[in-house]
Amino acid sequence: AMLRLRFLTWDVKDTLLRLRRPVGESYAAEAWAHGIRVQPEALTRSFREAYGAQSRLFPNYGQGRGLSSQQWWVDVVKQTFRLSGVHEEGVITLMAENLYHDFCSAGNWEVLPGAGETLSQCCQRGFRMGVVSNFDNRLEKILSQCNLRHHFEFVLTSEETGFAKPDGRIFQKALHLGGVPPEQVAHVGDDYTRDYRAARAVGMHGFLLRAAGQSAEPEVPPEHVLPTLSHLLTLIEK
């Protein structure tokens, strides 16, 4: 039976937008601009370590811990350089602040194939839409710069709401903003736990975008799996 959907919520990172290049390459280019040579691969590894440690210590960008998300990120970037063997604190601070601002812009992000077309088609079909993303407050600006913001009634970030997916409260907030019951809403995302399972736990429908070569989650029926975003309307209208 055709789903009686009125509203779609969307994850952003690796669903609608992705980084143009590995984090380490962006960081290495910034270092090179200051005459410092560091290998991109080393920076990517250090970034994963620094980001993981910061996320465990201060979840959701330090919300409720007296940290701004900007400070949270600047600390991650500084620690990434330190772990990669860069120790001039003055230049580390400068590079971290530059990179924080660089990642606000469309320069570091690209729209995934089919994303723009799919969003436009969903709007044409009369679906109302919003964003539900574990992101900091730069997201509005990034979506605007990538020319996607106009598709959405709201952009809910984990920083703004204080709850990060898979916490059901960020989805409850989206349902409240949309003014729609969960059974009339589907969430589209690429993460099984944070997107698919979390949305279904609050009674919403879920579609899981699965990149080629990603291992299958046995609990996800094939009619909920998107090999590409372009498959979405076909599945909804079945």
Image (cartoon, rainbow, N blue to C red):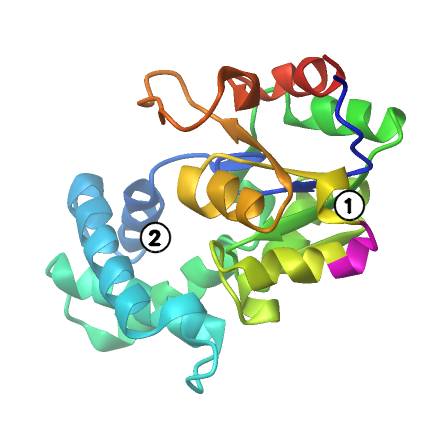
Q: 114 and 70: which one is in front?
A: 114
Q: As displayed, is residue 152 above or below residue 218?
A: below
Q: Residue at x 57, y 45 (%)?
A: 199
- Residue at disc 2, secondary structure: helix
Prevalent SS, magenta region: helix
- Residue at disc 1, secondary structure: loop
Q: Quadrant of the C terminus?
A: top right
Position in image of residue 35 (x %, y %): 24, 55
Position in image of residue 182 (x %, y %): 71, 47
Residue denoted by label 1:
152
Q: Residue at x 31, y 23 (%)?
A: 215
Inter-mark Cα distance, 1 to 2: 33 Å
As drawn, the residue found furthest toward the front would be 1
As drawn, the residue found furthest toward the left would be 85
Count of numbered tags: 2
As drawn, the residue found furthest toward the bottom would be 66
Q: Residues within 10 Å of mark 2 (few under 14, many from 20)?
A: many
Residue 188 is at least partly visible in this image: yes
Q: As displayed, is residue 162 above or below residue 14?
A: below
Which amino acid type is marked by label 1?
A: Phe
Residue denoted by label 2:
30
Which amino acid type is marked by label 2?
A: Glu
Q: Are marks 1 and 2 in contact (CB under 8 Å)?
A: no
Q: Which residues are magenta?
A: 176-180
Q: Residue at x 54, y 34 (%)?
A: 15
Residue 147 is at least partly visible in this image: no
Position in image of residue 24 (x %, y %): 28, 44
Quarter holding residue 67: bottom left
Q: Residue at x 62, y 51 (%)?
A: 132
Q: Residues within 10 Å of mark 1 (few under 14, many from 20)?
A: some
Of label 1 and label 2, which has the lower sequence position? 2
Q: Nearer the viewer, mark 1 or mark 2?
A: 1
